[in-house]
Image (cartoon, helix red, strand yellow):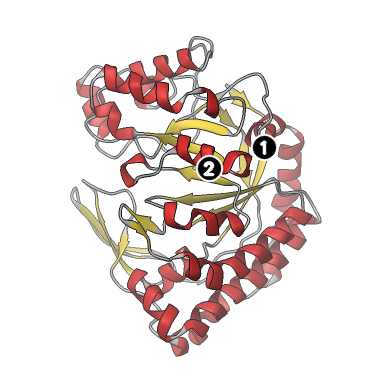
Amino acid sequence: MIWDRERYLAHCNFEYTGREMFCELFGPLYQLEAEWRRQGASAKEIAMTAFDWDYVLNFSLAGNCGAVTGIEPVTLEDNAERTVGIDKFGRKTLLIKSSATIAHPMTYPITCMDDWMKIKHWYTFSEDRINKEELLRQKELRDKGYLSLLWVPGGFDEPRELLGEEGVCIACYEEPELIEDILATIGDTCVKVMERVGEILPIDVLCIHEDMAGKSGPMFGPAHVKEFMQPYYEKIWSCAKNHGASLFSQDSDGNMNPIMDAILDCGINCFYPCEPAAGMDMVALRAKYGKRLAIKGGIDKYVLCQDQAAIKKELEYKMSASMLGGGTVFGLDHRIPNGVSIENYRYYVNEGRKMLNLPPISEEGWARMAF
């Protein structure tokens, strides 16, 4: 079912709108399509449109808060196994197609403050960041029920893009003023972008991508979040709220448990994808944080590789009473893994719909809900 912005925002702000929301947030991994074809999946199942997923009509606001580098990406090598290229940051990247959907940087543009000063202009504000003509067109979409999203660079993720994971962590101790200046510069630009966007139409959701944790835990501790990320988050969230936003949504894989208190203190009130394999338990998070935190995803994707009894057990736990009535967007905790049979995926969809008291599948359509 297609949701409009008012219903989606009410749902994520813990109002019961008469229906639970059941989504496919990310879609399948690279090789799953071939597996499903061999198993007899229909063209609509391959396209993910056969399952009547819930999703909300949305658009990303035409205000650019990110890096404006002027570098045109170039593909250096592309074959069945891998792609090598130069990305918009000038980094050499490698994508191994059998195991990933995102290219991995092999070089980075910053190693010290002097490097940062050479590229700082990538993040400074100019009026060219605002596409007023497109915003006026988007205003018509919002009036028709579309949700407006504004994406901002991550407080960990963007420095990581520039220095690499190891470089960011070392800089926190050896050159903290570098991280502080990067985030202060980005924050100032975000505020100026939001102010101009907000003159034309409101922001519904402030979206930020971090992916700052692995299975063993996050790469920043609570003290690092407070010192480096919180000033940036508070600055941008205060401005976004002044221009209509009610959701501050963070995307981060991995085990975020050690810093969830600190992250919520920064203003985050919506979190996904909540990976069980990394120790994230959406039911436990709801018990701890209640209505402070809306949750998207959280259903163990790897359970779909097991038998149907295991799938049912997972759904019964994740779709229990404490998770119902608003504040939860039910879905897998990331992309559908290779090895999930189409039979198991059909079972997951139908059993989940049954537990949530959703009507039988009757419509076509799917859109990513990863925001």
Q: Which residue is mark 1?
A: 13
Residue 141 falls left or right of residue 270? right
Secondary structure at badge 1 equals: loop
Name above or below for residue 20 compared with residue 141.
Answer: above
Secondary structure at badge 2 equals: helix
Of callouts 2 and 1, the N-terminal one: 1
Disc 1 marks which amino acid? Answer: Asn
Name above or below for residue 338 compared with residue 127.
Answer: above
- Residue sitting at the far bottom: 114
Q: Is residue 25 visible?
A: no
Residue 258 image point, x, y percent = 43, 56
Q: Is residue 241 visible?
A: yes
Q: Are marks 2 and 1 in contact (CB under 8 Å)?
A: no
Kindly identify the residue that appears in the image at 36 percent across and 71 percent down: 164
Q: Quadrant of residue 238?
A: bottom right
Mark nearest the camera among 2 and 1 is: 2
Residue 31 image point, x, y percent = 24, 37
Name above or below for residue 23 compared with residue 116.
Answer: above
Residue 1 image point, x, y percent = 57, 21
Q: Quadrant of residue 340?
A: top left
Quadrant placement of the C terminus: top right
In the rendered structure, find residue 288 and report the number of the disc placed on it.
Answer: 2
- Residue sitting at the far right: 199
Nearer to us in this view, 200 or 333: 333
Kindly identify the residue that appears in the image at 34 percent across and 16 percent down: 347
Residue 99 falls left or right of residue 265? left
Kindly identify the residue that appears in the image at 59 percent across and 66 percent down: 230
In the rendered structure, find residue 115 and report the number of the disc placed on it.
Answer: none
Q: Quadrant of residue 231?
A: bottom right
Residue 16 image point, x, y percent = 67, 25
Disc 2 marks which amino acid? Answer: Lys
Q: Residues within 10 Å of mark 2 (few under 14, many from 20)?
A: few
